[in-house]
Image (cartoon, coloured by chain):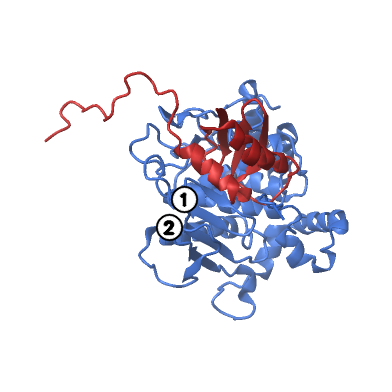
Chain colours: A blue, B red
């Protein structure tokens, strides 16, 4: 009767609903998870490409696999989700900057996964992409709720709107990607890896749109979401974790770059937004050691690792490092520069 | 008076903030301690990512961790009060208005 705290456990993940409708019963969780791993072990690139129509606009009815279907909704300053749908796939810009940034950002993120890695939406089954903007009053956050991305407008003093950085949009959508693949547990090291995967693909979305190579990119997450009253360029830096901001109110960027500075804490689910600096920096080192466009080789290796079925939900940094090295070997061969770069990167951050 | 501290962690930014509010011992005992006792049973794993996490301490009594998605009703009231409470130990000679910057006026 008097229960203000809502229990949100036992939400059935949508991939189970969509793919394994016969196994909703929680007692079948293990069987469903095994089936999911089996599904992702099918080579997603070749299977998606083999079934993809050359031109998705042709052959209505067969284009489902590759269809990009975005819906942007407006919460009008409330905390009610999803809000009112204000821009659907194919609609022209509506003139509300947050709505249009979200629409374009979802398209850019979808484009990275589909055009580079051959993945059809975040679930590799054409999941429609939904976002809500103008959530809450002076709301200083963006989040993934398991089904959609949600963006606040910021308080106007420290944070502006969260759609202003493409890396934030890519980051949130990548949480959906992780939910449908490794499903890294959001606590401690596995939680920091969950965060890092989102930061990595978030920056790759932006680098690809800007045409930046690894050595010219800024490697910042959340550049442009602070107001100009804040001393800082961004929230996080993959290039130099711990240096993205240093402000009287916000404090200094708390991210470590190596295991020597790993932060043990009970807050933030065990510092998932802090210790992500370590795997983030490993990705940066691997990508810059290889050079060129980071999404092509380093990004492919991280993508292969995340989708290959070898990342357990409670993955540690060192296990994840091993999986990326194995993924590099599988795709580029033993003794390849890619394998060397990835191993070097994890050693530089003291994980291997 | 009884002090209630609210620490917010997590969120996309992962930046921690802390607020606090003073309440009467009677209010703490009647309203807030029972609320924190309820929260201790909650341990929900969710699909939500980048949401805030609130750690609430009734100083000298007990603490509780509450995910943002559960912040409704009396929790919301408590958090709003803490956020809006004036700092009880203001730094000495805190200026009422921001200092003018040299050359700031045209
Ligand atoms: Zn995140």
Instruction: Find residue A127 and report its horizontal and vertical position in percent.
Output: 63, 65
Q: Secondary structure at mark 2?
A: helix
Residue placed under numbered mark 1 in the picture: A166
Q: Residue furthest left?
A: B106
Which image quarter: residue A148?
A: bottom right
Residue B94 lies, in percent from the top left, at 33, 23
Question: Residue under circle 2?
Answer: A101
Q: Earlier in the sequence, mark 2 or mark 1?
A: 2
Image location of residue A60, percent across then percent down = 59, 81
Image marks 2 and 1: residues in contact by CB distance under 8 Å: yes
Q: CA distance from mark 2 to mark 1?
A: 8 Å
Q: Position of residue A269 (x, y in %)?
A: 66, 37
Are both tags, 2 and 1, on one chain? yes
| A182 up-or-down from A82: above or below | above
- Secondary element type, mark 1: helix
Q: Chain of mark 2?
A: A
Please count the marks in the image: 2
Q: Nearer the viewer, residue B55 or B90?
A: B90
Find ligand 1 in the image and state its quadrant. top right
- For the point 57% across and 29% down, the residue is B2
In the rendered image, which quarter contains the C terminus of chain A?
A: top right
Q: Residue at image x 74%, y 49%?
A: A308
Residue B45, compared with residue B88, is above or below; it is below
């Amino acid at each position: 009767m008097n229960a203000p705290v809502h229990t949100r456990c036992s939400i059935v993940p949508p991939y189970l609903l969509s793919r394994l409708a016969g196994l909703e019963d929680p007692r079948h969780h293990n069987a469903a998870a095994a089936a999911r791993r089996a599904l992702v072990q099918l080579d997603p690139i070749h299977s998606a490409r083999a079934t993809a129509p050359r031109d998705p606009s042709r052959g209505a009815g067969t284009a489902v696999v590759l269809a990009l279907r975005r819906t942007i909704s407006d919460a009008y300053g409330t905390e009610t989700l999803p809000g009112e749908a204000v821009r659907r796939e194919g609609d022209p810009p509506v003139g509300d900057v947050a709505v249009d940034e979200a629409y374009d950002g979802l398209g850019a993120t979808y484009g990275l996964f589909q055009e580079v890695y051959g993945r059809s939406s975040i679930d590799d089954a054409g999941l429609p992409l939904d976002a809500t903007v103008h959530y809450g009053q002076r709301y200083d956050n963006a989040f993934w709720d398991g089904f959609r991305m949600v963006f606040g407008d910021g308080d106007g003093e420290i944070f502006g709107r969260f759609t202003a950085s493409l890396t934030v949009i890519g980051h949130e959508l990548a949480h959906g990607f992780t939910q449908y693949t490794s499903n890294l547990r959001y606590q401690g090291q596995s939680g920091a890896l969950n965060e890092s995967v989102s930061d990595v693909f978030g920056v790759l979305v932006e680098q690809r749109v800007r045409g930046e190579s690894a050595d010219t990119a800024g490697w910042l997450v959340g550049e442009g979401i602070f107001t100009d009253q804040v001393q800082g360029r961004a929230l996080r830096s993959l290039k130099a974790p711990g240096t993205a901001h240093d402000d009287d109110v916000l404090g200094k960027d708390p991210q470590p770059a190596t295991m020597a500075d790993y932060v043990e804490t009970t807050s933030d689910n065990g510092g998932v937004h802090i210790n992500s600096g370590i795997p983030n920096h490993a990705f940066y080192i691997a990508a810059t050691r290889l050079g060129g466009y980071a999404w092509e080789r380093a990004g492919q290796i991280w993508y292969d690792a995340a989708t290959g079925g070898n990342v357990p939900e409670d993955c540690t940094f060192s296990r994840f490092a091993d999986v990326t090295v194995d993924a590099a070997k599988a795709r580029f061969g033993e003794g390849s520069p890619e394998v060397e770069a990835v191993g070097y990167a994890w050693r530089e951050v003291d994980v291997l | 008076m009884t002090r209630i501290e609210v620490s917010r962690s997590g969120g996309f930014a992962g930046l921690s903030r802390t607020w606090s509010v003073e309440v009467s011992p009677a209010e703490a005992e009647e309203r807030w301690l029972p609320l924190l006792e309820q929260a201790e049973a909650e341990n929900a794993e969710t699909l939500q990512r980048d949401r805030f996490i609130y750690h609430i301490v009734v100083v000298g009594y007990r603490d509780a961790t509450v995910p943002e998605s559960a912040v409704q009703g009396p929790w919301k009231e408590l958090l709003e009060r803490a956020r809006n409470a004036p700092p009880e130990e203001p730094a000495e000679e805190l200026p009422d208005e921001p200092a003018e910057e040299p050359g700031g006026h045209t």
